Image: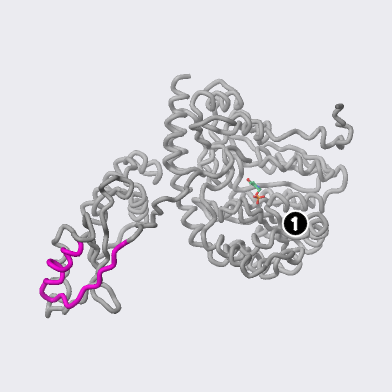
Amino acid sequence: MPIKTSYLAKHVRTLKPSGIRKFFDATAGMTDVISLGVGEPDFVTPWNVREAAILSLEDGYTSYTANAGLLELREAIAKYVDDYYCVSYDPEHEVTVTVGASEAIDIALRAILDPGDEVLVVEPCFVSYAPLVTLAGGVPVIVESKKENDFKVQPEQLETAVTERTKAIMICSPNNPTGSMLSKIEMERIAEVAKKHDLLILSDEIYAELVYDELYTSFAAIDGMKDQTILVSGFSKDLAMTGWRLGFVCAPRDISQGMLKIHQYAIMCASTMAQHAGLEGLRNGRSDMADMRKSYRQRRNYIVQSLNEMGLPCYKPEGAFYTFPSIEATGMNSETFATRLLQEERVVVVPGNAFGDSGEGHVRCSYATSMSQLQEAMKRMRRFVDKL
Amino acid sequence: MSMKLTATEIEVAEILEKDARLTNDELAKMMNLSVDQIHQMVKKLEDEKVIVRYVSLVDWTKIDGHQGVTAMIDVKVTPKRDVGFNDVAERIYRHKEVKSVYLMSGTYDLSVQVEGQSVNEVAHFVSQKLSTIDGVISTTTHFVLKKFKHDGTVYDSDDRDKRIVVSP
Ligand SMILES: Cc1ncc(COP(=O)(O)O)c(C=O)c1O
């Protein structure tokens, strides 16, 4: 039977499949694999949060909520953002509960882009950014953060990339895959570029709670930036809730209402039981978050030193749960390194080029894995590097 | 007697409480300190008896012929002048069958945990040894039927990693 590829839209046919998928398939059927390739917490959602969802089901909360999400949850989100990031949003008109940060990014882009509008995407970055810009009719313009700048994009680089079609800059700090975090001063300098050219900052702050050395600053809290920032965040990472698919987005009222229109037609509302769980997490999840943060910090310190010791130089990430060691000294490219490491030592890492061309020469190692697994993984990686 | 420790010393104690088998080298990496600093720190914790002992949690029910029995015994006591409960507590905990002794608030005074090979053995200990101690007024013995969770650890927990192997 002929395959009717013609039914598929052209822009979907030309969309590149995620480089991560390929690696996932390669591990199929393998045993004794240790994975440092996972982009989610190794913790299970705290019990009180799970229980809140169970109780909501027992109480019969099984219908739709308001499109923007339970008002109580939006109020809790607004309070949280105010308490911890010192930015105040109106829960009725400026906060939307989404199906993960993933949906928040999607509706934000769809709400702001006219066909042909350009978005500066700082790579290496989360895999969805450039494809979602394309799907929203925009044009992703890649700006590369460099190893020699600790993977922090320089304002001059952004300045050079701006054209009259540029609408927004996508920033993720702390970053997946590099773990690098912008300081307040660095953000202010980027904000200058945004102000000068009247650009929006689409700020993915999903790792804001997983910061280990310094205080975190939200882009929306930078002087004068609230009106030009779309703040995306969620529950996946800090409360270990990836499978619940719950996130949120805060934005100035007109943008927020625009996003809500898309969300209302495409999604209706986020899962009701997940919203009840998220509410409990915001109200009573601080101590669990603190415990997890402490554990990640210990593991970060451990893996960074171990990688450096084995000759894979590694920038010490300020946040998230990834390290992004350079593998250039091995003479391999990132895919070969990752493939051979998997075949010879059964350790999964993700080739850096899955996060953009500028990730080449690196691999992403997640330390969201138990200490005992990390110890074994470091032993195997060291053996692998030593025999090269 | 309690003492003030630095946040780092407390964190090291917390880590070792969860996993006493970590080496000083690994601890040093986790805490971003030198092996020597960690060595000093652990030694201090040990010397000060903050870290009292390193233990393994063994599930004896898995071993044929070693299941044994555990009883939690509520003990009412007449406190003695000057020494209060300490004297009686000491007389109780000197017996090797006794695994723990706590002074409790509420309707009884001491909570005593006893382990033995059989119900008979424990019953014998309670009637012959425990209740005959000077100052012990009464005992109520509860036998443990099954241990689900002990010292923060669930015995038969399903802790398989349920995540997909690679994700963005
Ligand atoms: C930078 C970044 N943004 C967004 C997401 C998606 O998060 P969510 O589960 O909330 O959709 C991830 C998940 O890996 C991420 O790393």
- Residue B143 x %, y %: 29, 64
A324 with respect to A127 (left or right): left
- Residue A359, position as x, y percentages in the image: 63, 33
Is A16 inside the magenta-drawn segment? no
Quadrant of the snapshot with the N terminus of chain A: top right
Please name the residue shown 60% across and 63% down the image. Answer: A53
Q: Which residue is mark 1?
A: A228
Q: Is residue B124 magenta?
A: yes
Q: Is residue B117 left or right of residue A159?
A: left
Residue at the location (82% across, 53% down)? A111
Q: Residue B162 appears in which quarter of the rendering?
A: top right
Can residue A137 be seen here? The reply is yes
| Start-end of magenta stretch | B122-144
Looking at the picture, which amino acid does disc 1 mark? Gln
Quick one: A126 or A34, which is closer to the camera? Answer: A34
Q: Residue at x 39, y 57 (%)?
A: B148
Residue B91 visible, this orientation: no
Report the residue at 43% width, 37% height from top.
A305
Q: State which chain disc 1 sits on.
A: A
A75 or A24, which lies in front? A24
